[in-house]
């Protein structure tokens, strides 16, 4: 029987755990930032002036929460009419797809940045 000692292994394992924890935090914050970007895109796309702000002000991004396969943050419109506008012809223009597209694009950007920071930390940069 023989023992093998690898110098610096404990430090490497500690650094990997720290990098993993930081990546999880970064991804959680990325979900909330992306949801917030989606809400802002929705609010900015309204073709009318909401003088009371009672509708668009109710839209918000939730804090990140753990779910079975990762983390999530949601875009929430607390008032029913905050996510769409009734047009002159009586139809509705739904702003949620605007918010979803913006959030999806932001999430990709933020998670890519988090993954790069993770890789840099593992590579000692």
Image (tube, rainbow, N blue to C red):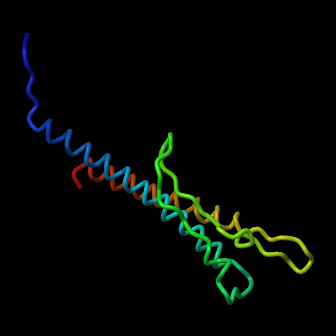
Q: In the image, is 52 to the left or to the right of 112?
A: right
Q: In the image, is 89 to the left or to the right of 24?
A: right
Q: Quadrant of residue 45?
A: bottom right
Q: Nearer the viewer, residue 98 or 57?
A: 57
Q: Quadrant of residue 46?
A: bottom right
How far from the left and from the top, in percent, is residue 8? 11, 38
Q: Is residue 55 above or below residue 77?
A: below
Residue with the most extreme right position: 89
Residue drawn at 43 percent across, 54 percent down: 27
Residue drawn at 64 percent across, 62 percent down: 101
Q: Quadrant of the C terminus?
A: bottom left
Q: In the image, is 78 to the left or to the right of 66?
A: right
Q: Nearer the viewer, residue 13 or 6?
A: 13
How far from the left and from the top, in percent, is residue 119? 32, 49
Q: Nearer the viewer, residue 76 or 122?
A: 76
Q: Is residue 122 above or below residue 76?
A: above
């Amino acid at each position: 029987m023989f023992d093998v000692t690898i110098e610096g292994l404990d430090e490497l394992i500690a650094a990997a755990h720290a990098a993993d924890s930081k990546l999880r935090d970064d991804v959680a914050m990325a979900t909330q930032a992306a949801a917030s970007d989606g809400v802002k895109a929705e609010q900015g796309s309204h073709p009318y002036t909401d003088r009371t702000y009672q509708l668009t002000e109710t839209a918000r991004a939730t804090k990140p929460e753990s779910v079975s396969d990762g983390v999530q943050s949601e875009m929430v419109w607390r008032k029913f009419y905050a996510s769409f506008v009734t047009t002159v012809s009586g139809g509705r223009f739904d702003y949620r797809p605007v918010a979803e597209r913006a959030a999806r694009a932001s999430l990709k950007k933020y998670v890519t940045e988090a993954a790069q920071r993770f890789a840099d930390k593992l590579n000692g940069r």
